[in-house]
Image (spheres, rainbow, N blue to C red):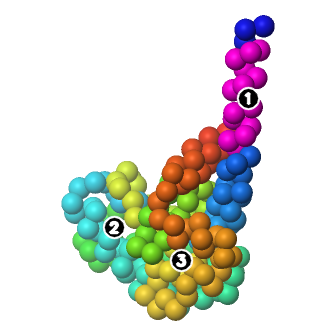
């Protein structure tokens, strides 16, 4: 009987808390389904490997801005999937020309990202479509940005507001707030349960 008295109030608190945050979580998940992220993992955390990663990032963005010209997320995912080998060749060329012998691997998939604060907006944690570039062992710090909408591409003429609803823009424009931590906890639990 004692467990019942403890369990019931805790269950009610959890239920009320989740129902309060459900609209924010739903909006967060809508955002993650409208974005294609670029994720580059360095070979290691050495200064040389981190500089190589940043150089590859610049080279990749300069040489792919025309490639990712699809009008929808699905178009750009399909472009990335069809060009995976060409993208690997592009990355490997930069690595070789820079004097390294690391191989790169390009993977187009969905992956979990923590909350990320950019200059003008904050993306909530969640599972996003991504183009993941792994340099060598891929055990170093990573770098990421948004390929679609083309927020991080050099010829960027788009804005997140061109693709997100007013409610979604409001969520990402507030800066990092406690609600992002709640989204992060929820998404981490959900991600682990789905593995």
Q: Element type at marker 3?
A: strand
Residue 163, image quadrant: bottom right
Q: Element type at marker 1?
A: helix
| Quadrant holding the C terminus | top right
Magenta includes 11? yes
Residue 33, image quadrant: bottom right
Quickly name the residue at label 2: 53
- Residue 143 position in % (x across, y down): 40, 64
- Residue 129 position in % (x across, y down): 62, 65
Extent of the magenta region: 4-18
**Circle 3: is it few (<14), some (14-19), or many (20+) Cα within 10 Å?**
many
Q: Nearer the viewer, residue 126 or 139?
A: 126
- Residue 55 position in % (x across, y down): 31, 75
- Mark 1 or mark 3, whichever is nearer to me: 1
Distance between the alpha carbons at the discs numbered 1 and 3: 41 Å
Q: Nearer the viewer, residue 72 or 57?
A: 72
**Circle 1: is it few (<14), some (14-19), or many (20+) Cα within 10 Å?**
few
- Mark 2 or mark 1, whichever is nearer to me: 1
Residue 30 visible to an observer of this rendering: yes
Q: Earlier in the sequence, mark 2 or mark 1?
A: 1
CB contact under 8 Å: marks 2 and 1: no
Q: Main secondary structure of the magenta part?
A: helix
Q: Is residue 109 left or right of residue 94?
A: right
Mark carried by residue 11 = 1
Count of marks placed on residues? 3
- What residue is at 69 percent from the left and 35 percent from the top? 14
Distance between the alpha carbons at the discs numbered 2 and 1: 47 Å
Q: Earlier in the sequence, mark 1 or mark 3?
A: 1
Quickly name the residue at label 3: 147
């Amino acid at each position: 009987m004692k467990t019942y008295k403890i369990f019931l109030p805790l269950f009610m608190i959890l239920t009320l808390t989740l129902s309060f945050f459900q609209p924010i979580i739903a909006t967060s998940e809508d955002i993650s389904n409208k974005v294609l992220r670029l994720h580059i993992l360095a070979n290691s955390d050495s200064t040389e490997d981190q500089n190589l990663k940043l150089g590859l990032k610049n080279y990749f963005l300069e040489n792919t801005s025309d490639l990712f010209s699809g009008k929808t997320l699905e178009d750009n995912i399909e472009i990335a999937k069809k060009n995976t080998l060409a993208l690997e060749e592009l990355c490997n060329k930069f690595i070789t020309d820079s004097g390294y012998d690391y191989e790169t691997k390009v993977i187009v998939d969905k992956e979990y990202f923590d909350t990320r604060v950019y200059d003008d907006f904050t993306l909530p944690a969640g599972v996003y479509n991504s183009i993941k570039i792994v340099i060598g062992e891929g055990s170093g710090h990573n770098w990421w940005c948004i390929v679609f909408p083309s927020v991080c591409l050099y010829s960027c003429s788009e804005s997140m507001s061109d693709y997100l609803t007013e409610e979604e823009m409001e969520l990402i424009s507030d800066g990092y707030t406690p609600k992002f931590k709640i989204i992060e906890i929820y998404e981490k639990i959900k991600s682990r349960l789905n593995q």
